[in-house]
Amino acid sequence: MSSIGNQLAGRLGLVSLSGGLRPAPPAPPSLVLVAHGSRDPRALSTVRALMDRVRELRPGLSVRLGHIELNEPLLPDTLAGLGHTDAVLVPLLLSPGYHVKRDIPEMAAAAPARARVAAPLGPHPLLVETLYARLVEAGWPARTGTDEAGTDDVVRRTSAVVLAAAGSRDPDSAAGTRRTARLLADRLGVPVVPAYASAARPTVPAALRSLAARGRHRVAVASCFTAPGRFATRCAEAAPWIASAPLGDHPAMARLVLHRYDRALAAPATPAQDTRVPA
């Protein structure tokens, strides 16, 4: 009965006081998830699972997927399929870098759709919430109050986390990863050292050696990757203790995607956001 009442109320809302039909509200811009792409078949299934979570949270919103490389659909093809409709591109990338600043805006600018590019997913507290949850799933003791459950000061003094990220030569990318590491350290109550799979230093093994030299032998590797892939696997294999799974389709990731979408829509259009090619 409640469902029928809601449907009736929705239909009555389309009727004006004069008895005519009000025009239906315009559909919101499509949300296009922009994934990097990977040769690992698990990556595509993971991103699709995240897309399904986003759709569950925002029924009625058109949610599409496009890849920068390696997987189909490629982003230019997804944008071409939208025609001249509006879209917001949400990069499934975890810090600013070349793809966010150059590749994605250039692909959007070449498409017929009027597209805004949202900020990358990190740094953000919802990203840290996901990192924490994945560590707990891997075996990190969950915190209660101000202390970790079942641990003491001696254990905390020997514990640490390496935040493993893809890496970039862009200084803004490294700054974003460092910010995420600080937020995660605040959540865990132990040092969190950012490290990289490529293009930046330190590497994960180097970060682990540095922590061991400081007496930190109980070290976990937190996977700061959206989906499984070569980099995520390599970083996890270096872990001396536990390694968390990639962020994947955690519910907080779906909320973060929608947060970036909403923020991009609310912000005034700028040349960097509104990438429509002038007619």
Image (spheres, grey):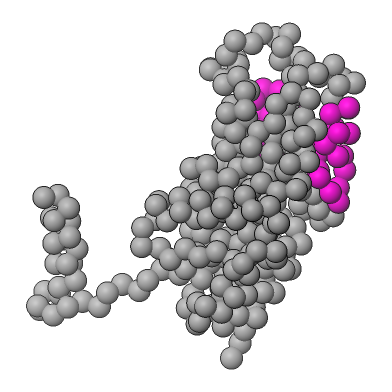
Relative horizontal placement of residue 197, taking residue 77 as reference (left or right): right
Query: Magenta includes 251?
Result: no
Q: Residue shown at 88%/27% (left/top)?
A: 209
Using the image, determine if residue 227 lies above or below residue 243. Answer: below
The outermost residue toward the front is 41
User: Based on the displayed image, in which of its 4 quarters is residue 19 positioned?
Assistant: bottom left
- At horizontal 86% and vertical 39% (from top left) the residue drawn is 203
Identify the residue at image location x=90%, y=21%: 213
Question: Measured from the top left, where is residue 184 in percent x and y?
Answer: 66, 33
Q: Position of residue 31 (x, y in %)?
A: 50, 64
- Residue 134 image point, x, y percent: 59, 33
Residue 27 picture location, percent across and down: 37, 71
For the question of whether residue 119 can be seen, the reply is no
Position above or below: 47 against 27: above
Count of marks overlaid on the render: 0
Instruction: Judge whether residue 78 can be spotted in this image.
Output: yes
Task: Please determine whether, in this image, residue 143 is positioned above or below residue 83.
Answer: above
Q: Quadrant of the C terminus?
A: bottom right
Depicted 108 relative to depicted 212: above or below: below
Start-end of magenta stretch: 180-209
Say which residue appears at 76% left-offset and 51% top-offset: 173
- Quick check: is 185 in the magenta stretch? yes
